[in-house]
Image: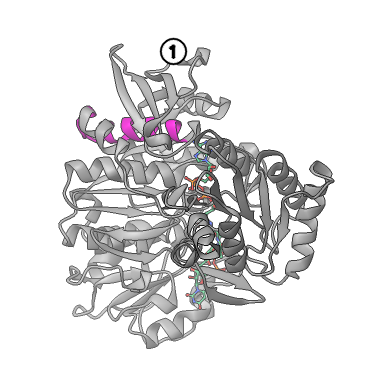
């Protein structure tokens, strides 16, 4: 698979270094050779391509200037940094260009050097605590119906047209983002949909990009270690709704944070209320006025009232009311980004599977249960996932799950308790144990399970995640649903510092292929 660092244009433009220095009022440490040119920008020495400007930013761990010599060895033509960085870097044999805030500059600098790639693209950004990935894929489905080639960027992957690479994080660093946008433009893409994390907003990763439309899903308690408190978290999210970042916005007003954002946003916003019967729906521009579980026994149908009062029959292809919310937001986002409303409604209803998000890996039938993979790894998300799957499960709900090591320990028994309350059969296993003893993590989960289900009936434990999936399939009939939660699309499992190639979907498919359905078992015994 291509490295994210290689998601760059093949034929980048060329800019004279002296012009860049003048445009951004940089202070060079020496007279500049008029022949010096640059063709790219990066903040990571490991990603330098010959011709790049290396922007050395002060980080939380280390100053990027520590790696300036490596960047120059890899072909960087100059280093942009602050005064402290210039001192750290010393004499590198290439110009050192000083700026007061190199982190803030990295995005605009990359956009300039790559000739403002976003200008030729329709751009949609989605932020919020939950639902970013799902909403972004729904938006991409609608954009694809209107623009033949699109790009979609987020937690799961960085995809331009048919080429995809694993994503290093939800929102990549600013110069990497501009590089991907330039690649998208080079490949003839018409539109880009991307997730914008709160970390990205706080760390300027989308600086230099003014989105055509941005969306807000919701705000729930999360990442307070980084943002300090809910006010700080909200302030960072709200940065996306500033005029230099977005032309227009669409805000889900189901929670108080969304209502506050809509009321204070400096850019024009449309509001969407997605809870049927919520009194805030009356004031919202768009509102979900009816919703029913039903589409193919998996998704939901719903009615979306528009600003002119017209009602539109719409559908979400994923189970659960949260996905009605995500689908409604995506439809309005795509429409605001120029997609005809009927086209957006139809495209979202038929959106392809989203890797690891309620992904249907095996369909029910021929002795096999419905097999789903979901990313739910918090107590709230686990409740939503199990509640969404119950109505489409004629038999038993079988859950394979665990909990991460080196992360929130308090949630382990809570997840166990929720699982025991909402699922019928449990297979407790490992997620990413990291540096912790996996048995200790499972024991904490099982403590919560026992609190809810002291009998221990239908509770199993498996020391290997792949074995847990095989065990679950062996227990299931075609009336049951097996759902594996926690890792979603993840391509690796982290155990004791080693990332092993591992993916729930692949294991599920292999186990299903090897599975001997009930009726065949009965025939074999006959
Ligand atoms: C808080 C945060 O996001 N930190 C990220 C940030 O750290 P930092 O700026 O403090 O950088 P640093 O590690 O001190 O290094 C300083 C500079 O030296 C450079 N460097 C460093 C090493 C080297 O060999 N060469 C080199 O050039 C780095 O690229 C960086 O520019 O830049 C680093 C380099 O790109 C990231 O590794 C690091 O992500 C950390 C590991 C991380 O886990 N980030 C998470 C929290 C994050 O961003 N998550 C959100 C999603 C959250 C969610 O919604 O769940 C995301 O968008 O993914
Ligand atoms: N609109 C929503 N409101 C509340 N919860 C949601 C919503 N959409 C999805 N979820 C829950 O959040 C989980 C993550 O969904 P999704 O991946 O789309 O969100 P995300 O914002 O990208 O989160 P992450 O960064 O963790 O991937 C899902 O398992 C689902 O249970």
Kindly give the residue lying farthest to the front in the view shown: 526
Residue 373 forms part of the magenta stretch: no
What residue is rendered at 44% in x and 50% in y?
Answer: 359
What residue is rendered at 32% in x and 30% in y?
Answer: 332
Q: Position of residue 433 (x, y in %)?
A: 67, 67
The answer to whether 307 is drawn above or below residue 63 in the figure is: above
Image quadrant assignment for residue 156: bottom left
Q: Position of residue 11 (x, y in %)?
A: 17, 71
Taking depth in this image into account, of 82 and 505 the one nearest to the observer is 505
Image quadrant assignment for residue 350: top left
Instruction: Tell me if 455 is positioned left or right of 66 in this view.
Output: right
What residue is rendered at 31% in x and 35% in y?
Answer: 349
Instruction: Tell me if 24 is positioned left or right of 443 in this view.
Output: left
Residue at image mark 1:
283
The span picked out in magenta is 323-341
Q: Position of residue 314 (x, y in %)?
A: 32, 27
Image quadrant assignment for residue 497: bottom right
The answer to whether 491 is drawn above or below residue 198 in the figure is: below
- The figure's colour scheme reads one colour
Instruction: Tell me if 359 is positioned left or right of 53 in this view.
Output: right
Specify whether residue 217 is in view.
Answer: no
Q: Position of residue 335 (x, y in %)?
A: 26, 31
Element type at mark 1: loop
Taking depth in this image into account, of 125 and 173 the one nearest to the observer is 125
Prevailing secondary structure of the magenta residues: helix
What quarter of the picture does the N terminus occupy?
bottom left
How many numbered marks have been drawn onto this rendered protein structure?
1
The answer to whether 299 is drawn above or below residue 155 in the figure is: above
The answer to whether 205 is drawn above or below residue 128 in the figure is: below
Residue 335 forms part of the magenta stretch: yes
Specify whether residue 509 is in view.
Answer: yes
């Amino acid at each position: 698979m291509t490295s994210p660092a290689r998601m760059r244009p093949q034929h980048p433009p060329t800019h004279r270094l002296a012009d860049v220095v003048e445009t951004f009022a940089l202070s060079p440490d020496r007279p500049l050779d008029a022949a010096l040119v640059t063709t790219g920008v990066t903040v990571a020495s490991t990603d330098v391509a010959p011709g790049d400007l290396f922007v050395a930013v002060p980080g939380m761990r280390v100053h990027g200037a520590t790696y300036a010599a490596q960047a120059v060895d890899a072909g960087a033509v100059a280093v942009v940094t602050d005064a402290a960085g210039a001192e750290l870097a010393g004499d590198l044999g290439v110009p050192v260009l000083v700026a007061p805030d190199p982190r803030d500059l990295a995005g605009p600098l990359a956009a300039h050097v790559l000739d403002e790639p976003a200008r030729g693209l329709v751009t949609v950004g989605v932020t919020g605590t939950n639902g970013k990935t799902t909403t972004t894929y729904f938006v991409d489905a609608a954009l694809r119906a209107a623009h033949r080639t699109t790009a979609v960027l987020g937690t799961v992957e960085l995809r331009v047209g048919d080429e995809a690479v694993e994503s290093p994080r939800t929102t990549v660093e600013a110069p990497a983002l501009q590089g991907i946008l330039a690649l998208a433009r080079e490949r003839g893409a018409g539109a880009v949909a991307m997730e914008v994390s709160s970390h990205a907003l706080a760390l300027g990763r989308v600086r230099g990009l003014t989105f055509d439309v941005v969306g807000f899903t919701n705000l729930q308690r999360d990442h307070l270690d980084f943002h300090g408190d809910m006010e700080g978290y909200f302030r960072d999210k709200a940065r996306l709704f500033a005029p230099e970042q977005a032309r227009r916005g669409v805000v889900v007003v189901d929670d108080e944070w969304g209502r506050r954002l809509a009321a204070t946003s400096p850019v024009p916003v449309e509001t969407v209320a997605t809870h049927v019967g919520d009194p805030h729906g009356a004031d919202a521009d768009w509102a979900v006025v009816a919703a029913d579980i039903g589409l193919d026994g998996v998704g939901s149908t719903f009615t979306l009232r528009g600003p002119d009062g017209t009602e539109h029959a719409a559908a979400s292809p994923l189970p659960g009311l949260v996905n009605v919310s995500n689908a409604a937001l995506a439809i309005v986002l795509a429409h605001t980004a120029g997609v005809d409303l009927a086209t957006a409604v139809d495209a979202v209803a038929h959106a392809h599977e989203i890797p690891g998000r309620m992904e249907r890996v095996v369909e029910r039938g021929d002795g096999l249960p419905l097999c789903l993979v979901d990313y739910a790894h918090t107590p709230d998300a686990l409740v939503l996932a199990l509640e969404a799957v119950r109505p489409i499960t004629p038999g038993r709900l079988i859950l394979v799950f665990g909990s991460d090591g080196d992360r929130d320990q308090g949630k382990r028994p809570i997840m166990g308790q929720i699982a025991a309350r909402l699922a019928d059969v449990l297979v407790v296993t490992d997620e990413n144990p990291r540096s912790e003893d996996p048995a200790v993590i499972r024991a904490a989960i099982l403590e919560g399970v026992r609190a809810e289900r002291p009998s221990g009936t239908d509770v199993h434990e498996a020391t290997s995640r792949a074995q847990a999936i095989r065990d679950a399939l062996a227990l299931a009939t075609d009336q049951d649903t097996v759902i594996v939660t926690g890792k979603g699309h993840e391509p690796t499992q982290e155990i004791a510092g080693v990332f092993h190639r591992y993916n729930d979907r692949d294991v599920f498919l292999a186990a299903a292929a090897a599975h001997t359905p009930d009726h065949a078992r009965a025939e074999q015994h006959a």
